[in-house]
Image (cartoon, rainbow, N blue to C red):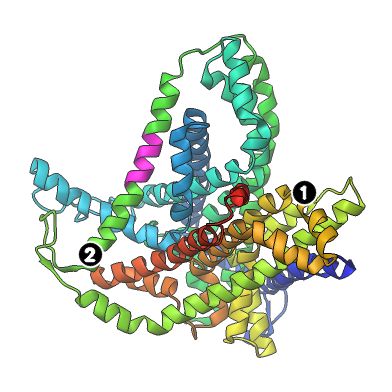
Amino acid sequence: MSGHWLAWFPRLALLVFLTPILVGLLGTWLPAFGWFPALGQHQFSTQPWLDLLAYPGFGTALQHSLVTGLGASILALVITFLILAAFYPSRAFQRLERLLAPILSVPHAAFAIGVGFLITPSGWLFRLSESLTGWPARPLNWLTYQDPWGISLMAVLTLKETPFLLFMALASLPALKVRQTLWLGTSLGYGRTRIWLLLIAPPLFKRLMLPFFAVIAYGLSVVDVALLAGPTAPPTLAVMVNRLFNAPDLLLRLPGAAGASLLLLVTLLCLALVWLLSRLSRLLLPWLLNGQRWSNSGLLRLAGGVSLALGLFTYLSALLTLVLWSFTGQWRFPAPWPTEWSLLAWQRGLGRMSEALWLTFSTGMVSALVALVLVLGALENEVRLRAQKPGFNSQRLLWLLYLPLLIPQLAFLFGVQVSLIWLGLDGRWWVLVWSHLIFVLPYCFLTLSGPYRAFDERYTWLGLSLSQSPWKTWWRVKLAMLWRPIGYSLATGFAVSVAQYLPTLFIGGGRFATITTEAVSLASGSDRRITAVYALMQQLLPLLVFLLALLLPAWRYRKHQELSHYQ
């Protein structure tokens, strides 16, 4: 598989997501400054910005976004380093690695719904507390979820982003030779905390800079999770902008565009501030190099263990709560378990969701398959360039791949929607697939690039010497040996597509309903049973694809155990 035609794959991959982002940004900035011919606005002005600043609750909404977005991102990073410093590398951490795939496959919205059913005043935790301790005898008048301070939103985002940062850290840790560094530091009398703080955390953070930026951008601009777990009066800035875009008064789209542009500006400023602080962290070197050993690491292990246990407990409890509610016939407070069991919710839910289920599956699978083909071609082209130019460095392209993850979706999706309406392409399924592909492709590349680059090309040379066919060698040797990481990349892309909320709303123009959009809509209703069914189906779809991605390669390799290194 060689030849200059491979160079078209990275170009196509960049075209897939750069074009809509650039067009969408322009289509959002113009209305933000008053130019929107479709609504009779033909003059540039700052009135949309003035209307945005005067909109009720704007200042508080901006504050909510900054506190929850930055707070959750920093907490997720700190917890990630605590867990790594406490347990990596160990057998306990190896068991945790096996749980990362099912945890990462849980969509944000489904997790937020499960946590809500768990910690609301009438949630399962308080029901269990009443049965064990007698408190509370009736539902408390507390805002334990969707609180006005954004604490519940911050907690949900922290718990969802920590596994992502752990996963991205796992790709970098082998290159840092952590085991050897720990051995060397211990032999000099330094404790585990001191070794991680001095020798491992700084280079690891440098490698995690882009993923951490993506977490910050997501936390500042998330809509679906903020609708489910965030404050409501006023909401976060992203939710407020989304409401302006969907308001009955069409002229409110102008201050909405200004709000989306402001959200992009705030995100860029926050990223610049984090980068500046990372550079200024060098000023701490005199304090770090004071010769203290910190030989006792008990507090580190305690903090890491508590963080890990709390996270796993929340994931399992939220899942179990959804399962209980989906099979509930009657469950009155304060009973710890349903007093009546029923399959009615599943019967009604499955009957209503058939179209949404098929749309979710088809859109996710097609977008993941297209992304996988583009990623394979781009990576193979990288192999070709590296063979021709030994000094070739592909890391510069990483910023471009992260671009859809660093720019708030609201900042360009409105512009894309307007452009599609102008071209007469709105409400088409293939356009919906393309909108999902914008976000699926970067994740597919990030999950597959490591194993693909680590592949020993001597197998390819051996195959060429026997078959003299680049295509046969790639198909029967390289692809066969990379079957499991390719399947994992496909499953990751599918899970990302299933979780897309805003692209489905904006690009679909209300014509398409997926499991995710339906689950978020139902969460504001009063029927927890149907909501639980939809949230569970939203989790089951990616989980089944991940399961197939693990089982099919295992079945394929059952007679070729020597390939286990690439599984």
Q: At label 1, which amino acid type do we have? A: Gln
Q: Is residue 320 left or right of residue 65?
A: left
Numbered range of the magenta stretch: 306-313
Does 310 lie within the magenta span?
Answer: yes
Q: Where 26 sits versus 216, above or below? A: below
Q: Earlier in the sequence, mark 2 or mark 1?
A: 2
For disc 2, the neighbor class at 10 Å (few under 14, some 14 to 19, many from 20) is many
Instruction: Classify the position of the N terminus by image quarter.
Output: bottom right
Which residue sits at x=42%, y=80%?
356
SS for tag 2?
A: helix
Chief SS of the magenta region: helix
Q: CA–CA distance between discs 2 and 1?
A: 47 Å
Q: Where 373 sits versus 271, above or below? A: below
The image position of residue 224, as x and y in percent, is 45, 64
The image position of residue 199, as x and y in percent, is 64, 24
Q: Residue furthest bottom?
A: 424
Q: At label 2, which amino acid type do we have? A: Trp
SS for tag 1?
A: helix
- The answer to which of 225 and 192 lies nearer the viewer is 192
Which residue sits at x=62%, y=51%?
563
- The picture quadrant where one finds residue 325 is bottom left
Which residue sits at x=63%, y=42%?
208
Q: Is residue 445 left or right of residue 357?
A: right
Find disc 1 in the rendering and name its residue.
Answer: 395
Q: Is residue 537 left or right of residue 546?
A: left
- The answer to which of 109 and 345 lies nearer the viewer is 345
- The answer to which of 539 and 221 lies nearer the viewer is 539
Find disc 2 in the rendering and name its residue.
Answer: 325
Q: Is residue 491 visible?
A: yes
Which residue sits at x=72%, y=66%?
475
